[in-house]
Every structure is written in C-alpha cells, then in structure tokens.
C-alpha cells in the first residue's frame, strides 16, 4: 500500500465533515486485520474515549459481509486508532498526521497543494476570495 496515497486519502477525509469510513478502509489504511480494528474500536467506546452515538452510523450497503461491516465510522475513530495502534502503517500515518498537525498549528492553515495544482481555476478563485474575506475582517 502506497503511504503517500493513503495519507492523501486521509487528508481528503479529514477535510470533509461528512466523510465516514468502513472497517475495511480502517484496517487497510492502518495495516491491521479487521478483527483487531473492531476490537480497538470497541475498547475506544468502552473507555468512553468517543461516543458511538456520534461517531458511527449504520452502513446502508448490501455488500457488508459481517455485523462489524455494517458500521461506518467517523474520522474521529480513525484518528483515535492512529494514535493507539503500533503497526508499521499506523506509525507511518501517525508521523504524517503529526507533521500535518504541526504545520497547521504553526501556519494556522493547511493547503492540499496537489489538489490545488490539479484542480480547476475556480477552486483557486474560491480560495482567493475566502482568504481576502478573512483579511478584511
């Protein structure tokens, strides 16, 4: 699995408020078996680190293979797992995530350079308008 692509997917997910991930997405990104991911998620809920009412929802897909696959998890769950797990992939994601958070903390903003470079001119125009409106306030 290409970590750079996975980090891009993670950033894309974080940038979207309504993004939900499956157990399969989580296990693939973090390099762990789905049963391990499900057990860790259960621990997160049992320890009241996160509230299952607000961080999971029923998956409407008929392709779900098991009871655990019937759930979609919020990015909050993914972030909690990133900092709990010790797999090589989880460590790599954690390093990238920490670097990105550090950059955000220092600069006060974050840009996805690749999507801006490859996006439409309208996207850059919208960013310019947004930035200008913040400067005026």
Image (cartoon, rainbow, N blue to C red):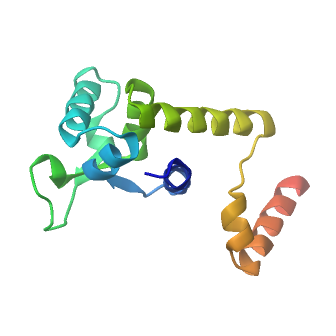
Which residue lies most toward the right here? 136
Residue 49, percent from left and from top: 35, 25
Is 21 placed left or right of 65 in the picture?
Answer: right
Q: Position of residue 100 (x, y in %)?
A: 65, 40
State whether residue 9 is above or below residue 92.
Answer: below
| Image spot of residue 51 (x, y percent) | 30, 34
Nearer to the camera, 88 or 70: 88
Residue in front for this viewpoint, 108 or 23: 23
* Residue 12: % across, % down: 54, 57
Q: Residue at x 43, y 32 (%)?
A: 88
Q: Residue visible at 77% across and 66% down?
A: 127
Residue at image location 42% in from the left, 57% down from the top: 19
Q: Residue at x 14, y 60 (%)?
A: 64
Question: Where is residue 61, by image quadrant?
Answer: bottom left
The answer to whether residue 81 is left or right of residue 107 is left
43 or 97, which is in the foreground? 97
Q: Residue furthest top?
A: 47
Identify whether 36 is placed above or below 86. below
């Amino acid at each position: 699995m290409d970590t750079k692509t996975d980090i891009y997917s993670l950033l894309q997910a974080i940038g979207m408020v309504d993004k939900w991930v499956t157990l399969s997405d989580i296990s693939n990104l973090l390099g762990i078996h789905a049963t391990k991911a499900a057990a860790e998620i259960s621990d997160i809920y049992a320890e009241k680190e996160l509230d299952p009412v607000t961080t999971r929802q029923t998956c409407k897909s008929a392709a779900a293979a098991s009871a655990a696959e019937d759930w979609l998890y919020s990015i909050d769950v993914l972030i909690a797992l990133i900092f709990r797990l010790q797999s090589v992939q989880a460590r790599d994601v954690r390093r990238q995530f920490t670097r990105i958070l550090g950059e955000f903390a220092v600069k006060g903003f974050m840009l996805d350079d690749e999507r801006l470079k490859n996006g439409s001119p309208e996207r850059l125009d919208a960013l310019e308008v947004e930035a200008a409106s913040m400067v005026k306030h």
